[in-house]
Amino acid sequence: MATFEIVGKTRLINAFNRVEKEIKLQRRKIISNSAQTYQVLLIGNIFSQKYADATWEYNKTYKKWKNKHYPNKVYWNLTGDLVNAISIVRSGFSAEVGIMPKQYSSRNSANIGQYALKMEYGGKKHNQPARPVFAPTFNDFYDNEFQVVIDKAVSSIVSKWY
């Protein structure tokens, strides 16, 4: 019968412990960094109008009202309340980015979440077309930015092995 012994087993056990500790830390960082990156990207896309479409037109009545009360304001950023309401809620090993329930405009009693839903998916009442920004921003984040977050975490974990 052959007997095997790991030479330097203390060093190996210490490396496993460092890696295990770093995995736990990076698990939280991936969630936090992903939420922060998506939030910044979302707000940036609203300000830059990255997903605005030249075919998006306001109806005549709304266009007249908007030009009178909020000239030169862009889609998604009429008063700034929506952008200011975009927040991150963390819970355990998850994080959500969006408009939290029951947030209202500081200028009127409009529910900001309802406004965001109508902008994202459209509204039948006034024949409002969908003008999405949350979904395309998430797809952009997932396709481009998420891998950067993961790569940083993996590099950090690997560095703890040595």
Image (cartoon, rainbow, N blue to C red):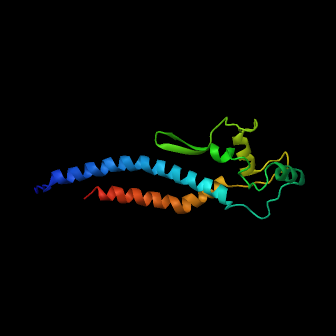
Name which quarter of the figure residue 89 lies in.
Answer: top right
> Residue 135, percent across and down?
64, 54
Q: Residue at x 52, y 44 (%)?
A: 95
Q: Quadrant of the C terminus?
A: bottom left
Q: Quadrant of the N terminus?
A: bottom left
104 on left or right of 44? right
Outermost residue, bottom side: 54
68 on left or right of 43? right
> Residue 48, percent across and down?
66, 60
Q: Residue at x 82, y 48 (%)?
A: 69
Q: Residue at x 56, y 58 (%)?
A: 141
Q: Residue at x 37, y 47 (%)?
A: 25
147 on left or right of 48? left
Outermost residue, right side: 61
Q: Nearer the viewer, residue 8 or 141?
A: 141
> Residue 66, percent across and down?
82, 51
Q: Nearer the viewer, residue 155 or 67?
A: 67
16 on left or right of 110? left
Position of 101 relative to 15 (above/below) = above
Name which quarter of the figure residue 106 lies in.
Answer: top right
Q: What is the total number of numbered labels drawn onto the structure image?
A: 0
Q: Nearer the viewer, residue 33 or 121?
A: 33
> Residue 149, percent across and down?
46, 57
